[in-house]
Image (spheres, rainbow, N blue to C red):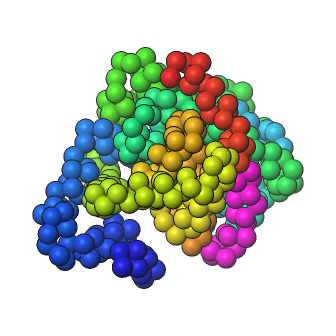
């Protein structure tokens, strides 16, 4: 009954958090502990009553401030100077601007929204089909939650024990860069013929753009560096990111005025509330499942069928790719990770490696119809229609799945850098 209510609610378009709460009402109808309304409400609040979760609205606020301050446009200009002259230059700039923006926001949706408004019309002017420009923008935005700082990484570390945020931050660097490289290779072989010959930029203008790009690029260095050195926690680093973006926007670039702040704070609160209510609802659901020993039963059942780590990884990848079609990544992570993580540990899979595989896997769901958030965002900008966008995204989706399989079956890609740094 619980899963039937959840499935029907999702199919008729009920938001994920409220679909979960609707399923919980089946439990709460008895009124006996732990199925009372008071017990579920207590667990819902407990799920969001965490100092570490404060990093999420702070990183979202930092991203909003950076968009408003003009940091995004400077990153794009910096990328264009660095790699804009190569074959298919603007498509490469799109991809590697996402890599740089990933070090600032940690959100794929923010990446799609910020970069899409600039790149889609600009790429169309340079000869790229509008639907291809939109698809590439959505596909490259998946890099955002993999390269640190990353909101899904923070949430994953809160769900399970045995993995730290700094270790996951470092572990995501190489897979994120690898994805960017393979997307660039796809552009070289299949899309470089679209672009017209780029115009030569004066040397003085290049120097100015490179200098302007230094200030935004220093932010991820300070944020990640301070966490790795043990100076601050991820939450404190997020607060530092907000302060840095505010100072840059108000005093250095002077694009943010006091009257802009209420709107920025309002958008941040709405985006944060969406994530927090999902976290709270799933926390209550997981508490009820744990009380009934459902994760233990599923673990024992899975281990009776699967005996090798590689078989389990293949099953997890297939499961999460299907789940990503219908469920938003963070919600799917909150529901499934408490069940899958203990099984992975018992099979001897490195917890950090498994975490990156899961996060990478679920983030691909952001570009898969019918529920891919990045597809909806990019289509609202490009207005090319979901059918055309889906056809264009399929080859890029195949590239991402290929990189995912490489990351899953070559653990050293994920674990080498954290081990070298002592995590």
- Which corner quadrant of the image does residue 290 belong to? bottom left
Residue sitting farthest toward the front: 304
Residue 378 is a magenta residue: yes
Residue appearing at x 67%, y 61% in the figure: 135
Residue at point 79%, 38% (across, down)? 85
Q: Quadrant of the N terminus?
A: bottom left
Q: Position of residue 59 (x, y in %)?
A: 38, 41
- Which residues are the magenta region? 375-402
Magenta span dominant secondary structure: helix
Q: Which residue sits at x=71%, y=32%?
A: 82
Total residue callouts: 0
**In the rendered image, the vertical position of residue 120 relative to residue 250, given as above or below:** below
Left or right: where does residue 69 sit relative to residue 353? left
The residue depicted at 43 percent of the width and 77 percent of the height is 7
Residue 67 on image: x %, y %: 45, 46
State whether residue 270 appears in this view.
no
Of 120 and 372, nearer the camera is 372
Residue in front for this viewpoint, 399 or 304: 304
Looking at the picture, tell me which residue is in the foreground, 222 or 9.
Answer: 9
Q: Is residue 265 visible?
A: yes
Residue 94 position, x and y percent, is 66, 47
Q: Nearer the viewer, residue 16 or 298?
A: 298
Whether 244 is drawn above or below 119: the answer is: above
- Answer with left or right where residue 19 lies relative to residue 167: left
The quarter holding residue 25 reads: bottom left
């Amino acid at each position: 009954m619980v899963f039937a209510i959840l499935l029907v609610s999702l199919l008729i378009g009920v938001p994920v958090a409220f679909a979960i709460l609707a399923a919980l009402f089946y439990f709460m109808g008895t009124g006996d502990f732990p199925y009372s309304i008071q017990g579920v409400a207590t667990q819902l609040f407990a799920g969001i009553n965490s100092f570490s979760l404060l990093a999420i609205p702070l990183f979202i606020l930092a991203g909003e401030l950076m968009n408003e301050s003009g940091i995004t446009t400077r990153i794009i200009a910096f990328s264009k100077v660095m790699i804009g002259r190569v074959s298919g230059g603007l498509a490469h700039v799109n991809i590697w601007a996402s890599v740089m923006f990933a070090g600032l926001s940690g959100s794929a949706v923010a990446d799609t929204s910020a970069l899409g408004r600039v790149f889609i019309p600009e790429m169309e002017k340079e000869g790229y089909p509008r639907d291809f420009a939109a698809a590439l923008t959505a596909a490259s935005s998946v890099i955002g939650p993999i390269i640190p700082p990353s909101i899904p990484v923070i949430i994953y570390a809160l769900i399970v024990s045995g993995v730290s945020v700094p270790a996951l931050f470092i572990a995501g660097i190489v897979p994120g860069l690898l994805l960017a490289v393979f997307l660039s290779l796809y552009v070289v072989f299949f899309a470089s013929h679209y672009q017209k010959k780029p115009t030569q930029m004066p040397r003085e203008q290049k120097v100015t753009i490179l200098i302007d790009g230094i200030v935004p690029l220093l932010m991820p260095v300070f944020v990640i560096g301070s966490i790795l050195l043990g100076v601050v926690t991820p939450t404190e680093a997020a607060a530092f990111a907000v302060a840095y973006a505010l100072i840059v926007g108000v005093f250095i670039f002077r694009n943010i005025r006091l009257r802009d702040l209420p709107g920025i704070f309002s958008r941040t609160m709405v985006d944060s509330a969406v994530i927090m209510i999902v976290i709270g609802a799933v926390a209550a659901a997981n508490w009820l499942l744990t009380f009934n020993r459902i994760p233990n039963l599923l673990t024992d059942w899975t281990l009776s069928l699967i005996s090798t780590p590689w078989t389990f990884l293949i099953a997890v990848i297939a499961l999460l790719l299907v789940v990503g079609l219908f469920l938003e990544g963070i919600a799917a992570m909150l529901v499934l990770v408490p069940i899958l993580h203990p099984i992975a540990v018992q099979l001897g899979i490195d917890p950090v490696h498994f975490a990156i595989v899961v996060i990478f896997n679920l983030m691909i769901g952001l570009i898969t119809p019918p529920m891919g958030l990045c597809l909806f965002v990019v289509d609202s900008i490009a207005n090319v229609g979901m059918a055309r966008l889906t056809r264009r995204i399929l080859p890029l989706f195949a590239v991402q799945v290929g990189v995912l399989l490489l990351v899953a079956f070559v653990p050293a890609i994920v674990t080498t850098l954290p081990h070298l740094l002592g995590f």
